[in-house]
Every structure is written in structure tokens, then in C-alpha cells.
Amino acid sequence: MRLLRTLADWLGAGALCVAPFIIDSTEGKILAIAGLALLTLQAIRKECYNLVLLNTIGIGGYLYAIYF
């Protein structure tokens, strides 16, 4: 289980490293959403609720950018 958590953390970080280079496309926004969602799980585990809020707002912003 710990390995899965660590993998999710690194995948989230990797997704957020790649996303800015393709953020103008829908795929880039989806990648950013996925990265933020994975890192939100880590922030919840670490009880960093300010980051949970920031990530949630970021996800909402990217969803808004995709659909409007």
C-alpha cells in the first residue's frame, strides 16, 4: 500500500511537471487536473489543508477552462 501511495505522489508530481508545456490543449488541462488530484491525496495524508484547498480550486479552474 505504501508503494502505491508513493507511486501516486510521484505520478502527480510528474503530471504537473509536464502539463505546463501542453496546457493550451485539452489534454494538458486534463493532465493538470489528474496531477492535482493525485497530489491532493498526499496533502490530505499530510494534513496540509491549505494545499487541499488550493488544489481543489485549481481543479475547478481547469475544469472551467475546458468547458467554458
Image (spheres, rainbow, N blue to C red):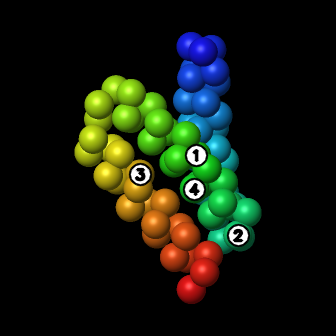
Mark 4 neighbour density, 10 Å: few (under 14) some (14–19) many (20 or more): many
Dot 2 or dot 4: first in sequence order is 2
Q: Nearer the viewer, residue 28 or 5?
A: 5
Residue holding disc 1: 35
Residue 33 location in percent, x, y?
57, 56
Mark 4 is on which residue type? Answer: Ile
Q: Quadrant of the C terminus?
A: bottom right
- SS label for mark 2: helix
Q: Nearer the viewer, residue 47 or 14?
A: 47
Disc 2 + disc 3, Cβ < 8 Å: no
Disc 2 + disc 4, Cβ < 8 Å: no
User: What residue sits 34% from the left and 26% below the top?
Assistant: 46
Mark 2 is on which residue type? Answer: Thr
User: What residue sits 66% from the left and 54% below the top?
Assistant: 31
Quadrant in which residue 28 is drawn: bottom right
Mark 1 is on which residue type? Answer: Gly
Mark 2 neighbour density, 10 Å: few (under 14) some (14–19) many (20 or more): some
Disc 4 + disc 1, Cβ < 8 Å: yes
Residue holding disc 4: 33
User: What residue sits 61% from the left and 76% below the top?
Assistant: 66
Residue holding disc 2: 26
Residue 9 location in percent, x, y?
55, 29
Quadrant in which residue 48 is drawn: top left
Dot 2 or dot 1: first in sequence order is 2
Mark 3 is on which residue type? Answer: Asn
Q: CA distance from mark 4 to mark 1?
A: 5 Å
Dot 1 or dot 3: first in sequence order is 1
Disc 4 + disc 3, Cβ < 8 Å: no
Disc 1 + disc 3, Cβ < 8 Å: no
Q: CA distance from mark 4 to mark 3?
A: 9 Å
